[in-house]
Image (cartoon, helix red, strand yellow):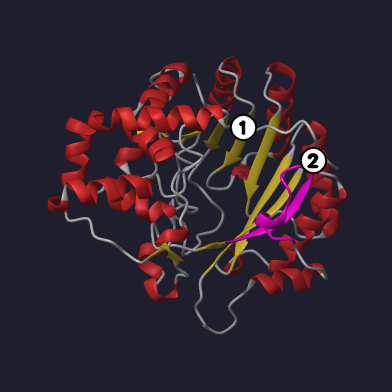
Amino acid sequence: MNDLSSIALLVTYQCNIECKHCGLSCSPREKEWMTMDEMKDIAVQASDLGVISIVLTGGEPTLIKHEELCNYFRFIKDKTSISNIRIVTNGHWAKSYEKAYSVLKEWKDAGLDELNVSCGEFHQEFVPIENIGHAYKAGCDLGFITVLLAGEFTKSKRENKLTPYDFEKILGCRIMQHHEVSPFITKKYAMTCNNAVSYGRGYKYIKLEDIPLTKYDNLPNTCKDTISTLSLHPDGNATICCGVGARDVPFLSIGNWREEKLQKISVRANDDLFANLIKFYGLRALKEKLMKTHPEFGLTHKLNYTGLCELCFEIFSNEKALNYLNTSGLELEEELISQKIMYLSTIYSSKYVYQ
């Protein structure tokens, strides 16, 4: 069974801004891009694999010329079976409500379904907070399936730091948090308040004491995006996770989309031991197993984490653990298969959806 449902196109590492927390270290100086022909070919291949969603991200995907972007949305809707297109943008183009409405209407008419606007205390050093409000209001008024403000924050008390409340003030209303939204509605307008973390460029600029921590016991065990999402990078790299922080993490790489077809990469991802351990066995379960059976690996119990990604990196960057999993990881195969069967047999899709 192929679990692939979404392709994330990191069309470029180039960005018009240079946020201090950027996990992919994007900047105006980056030069690597996917070509439009490559993007179209990827969409066709993804459609043939039954993928239902394409996400355009980066970098800043709206650096693509406006008409070319609209033509790409139309191509996906007209030439493939992909039913959902999402874009992740920093909102630099939303300089007024009227401008935001005009841009978004053309995107929506061309086929765009979902709008994600990255924001937070670091983005708004470069993009006026008012832009975020313009994009959010216009997106909601145009009836996009999803309009999501994706905010990243620290607990720093520095002067003039933006908080989630500042975004609510510019809109004049409370923004529903992502976790509050029912999964059984067809439109989702909300905000996520994620923790900025110390990887990528953030490793240099963000102090660990400023990162809100999550108790180990409150971390999810598995990562739902692994295998289900393939992230394709502008340098040709394909990774088994959502892409943030994956630019320089070798164990997340699963192939090169410029050298192989997506079908081959997808099959490899579906069968990859590390990917299956992350998605079905679980990172907490894996760490506890390794600590119990192989204390010589040096993995120790930690009370708090910046998030699940930190736990993932802790395990798979441990050289002794990595060597063991590469050579003897199939010793976990029986438990892994049991967990995978249980997961796949309990996927629930409600036929009752409310507006």
* Outermost left residue: 296
Which residue was labeled with disc 1? 54
Percent x, y of residue 77: 73, 23
Compare residues 132 and 344 and report the one nearer the observer: 344
The answer, for residue 13, to whether it is visible in the render is yes
Percent x, y of residue 23: 44, 54
Write the residue at 58% across / 78% down: 161
Crowding near the residue tagged with mark 1, few <14, some 14–19, many ≥20 C-alpha atoms within 10 Å: many
Q: Is residue 13 left or right of residue 311?
A: right
N-terminal of the two: label 1 or label 2?
Answer: 1
SS type, badge 2: loop
Which residue was labeled with disc 2? 186
Write the residue at 43% across / 53% down: 308
Measured in 3D between alpha carbons, the distance from the residue under mark 1 to the one under mark 2, in whole angstroms, is 18 Å
SS type, badge 1: strand
Identify residue type, mark 2: Thr
Compare residues 93 and 87 and report the one nearer the observer: 87
The answer to whether residue 195 is above or below residue 48 is: below
- Determine which of the numbered discs, if any, sits on residue 253 in the image: none
Point out the stretch of residues depicted in magenta.
176-193
Crowding near the residue tagged with mark 2, few <14, some 14–19, many ≥20 C-alpha atoms within 10 Å: few
Q: Nearer the viewer, mark 1 or mark 2?
A: 2
The reply to whether discs 1 and 2 touch (Cβ–Cβ < 8 Å) is: no
The answer to whether residue 44 is above or below residue 57 is: above
Write the residue at 25% across / 48% down: 317
The answer to whether residue 102 is above or below residue 179 is: above
Write the residue at 52% across / 83% down: 157
Q: Is residue 102 left or right of residue 52?
A: right
Q: Is residue 292 left or right of residue 349?
A: left
